[in-house]
Image (cartoon, rainbow, N blue to C red):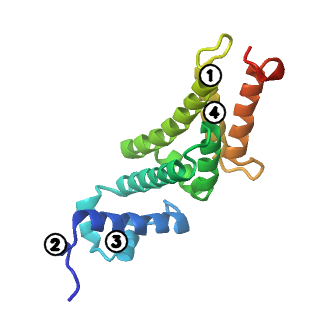
Amino acid sequence: MPRNRQQIPREERTGDLLAAATELFLAKGYAKTTMADISSAAGVARGNVYWYFDSKDHIFAAVMNRMLSREIRILNEEQAGADPLSRLVRGLSDMRYSRPLHQAMHDRLPHSEEVREAHNTFLNWIVGLVDELMAERGLDSAPGIDAALVRDVAIAVFEGANVPNDQNRPAHEMIRFLMESVLARCAGPKGRKR
């Protein structure tokens, strides 16, 4: 006898819905994925999806947060001793497969608070690693270095790299170049800080 909704723990059912939504969003894109598609793929009655998620934007934000959390967990396990720049570059490189979903987030930002929050979580992760790198190198309070500007430029590079354009280099390559350039600018002769 198949398990009905009452017999399946809420966390398990939510996980099933998120797994199905992730696969569909990656395969079809946000715009072409419907809640009916998600419910069918997860084996949940169409109307019951709304017991778990208020809207497609809610499930989309949850998918994006889950993907970022997974990447952070993997980086913490595999790159525990690595410097912040290496972790950031590795994380952005690993998440290149989700680039179309990041683009879809931008389309939804004006329409959904949940998507804005998920987007901000992602940007805050980038800023946190940039801040960690700056602090590690003593550049967060170095004279002549505007740490806020470095953060803003890193975010602008990342966001710009996610605009559809066949000529763009991957964000992780551009951010590595940016941060290494900032670090080199701040180093005097023989690698000493100015």
What kind of residue is marked 3? Answer: Ser
Residue sticking out furthest to the right = 189
Q: Which residue is mark 4?
A: 154
> Which mark, by number, is residue 39?
3
Q: Which residue has dot 2 on it?
A: 6
Which of discs 3 and 2 lies nearer the camera? The answer is 2
Residue lying farthest bottom?
1
Q: Is residue 110 visible?
A: no
Say whether residue 54 is left or right of residue 139: left
Vertical order, 63 against 85 (above or below)? below
Query: How far is mark 4 from mark 2, CA to CA?
Result: 47 Å
Residue closer to the observer: 135 or 162: 135
At 62% from the left and 22% from the top, the residue drawn is 149
How far apart are the two marked residues, 4 and 3, measured between alpha carbons?
Answer: 38 Å
Q: Earlier in the sequence, mark 1 or mark 4?
A: 1
x%, y% of residue 87? 60, 44
Task: Report the number of numbered marks.
Answer: 4
Q: Residue at x 74, y 20 (%)?
A: 186
The disc, 3 or 2, on the residue closer to the chain's N-terminal end is: 2
**For the view shown, which residue lies furthest in the top direction?**
143
Residue at image mark 1: 149
Decide: few, some or many residues near mark 3? Use Cα within 10 Å; few <14, some 14-19, many ≥20: many
Q: Amino acid at mark 2?
A: Gln
For label 3, the SS is helix
Residue at disc 4, secondary structure: helix
Mark 4 / mark 2, whichever is N-terminal:
2
Marks 1 and 3 close (CB-CB < 8 Å): no
Which element carries disc 2, helix, strand or loop? helix
Disc 3 from disc 2: Cα separation: 16 Å
Does residue 41 appear to the left or right of 185 in the view shown? left
Q: Amino acid at mark 1?
A: Leu
Count neighbours of disc 2 (C-alpha within 10 A) and say few if under 14, some if 14 to 19, many if 20 or more: few
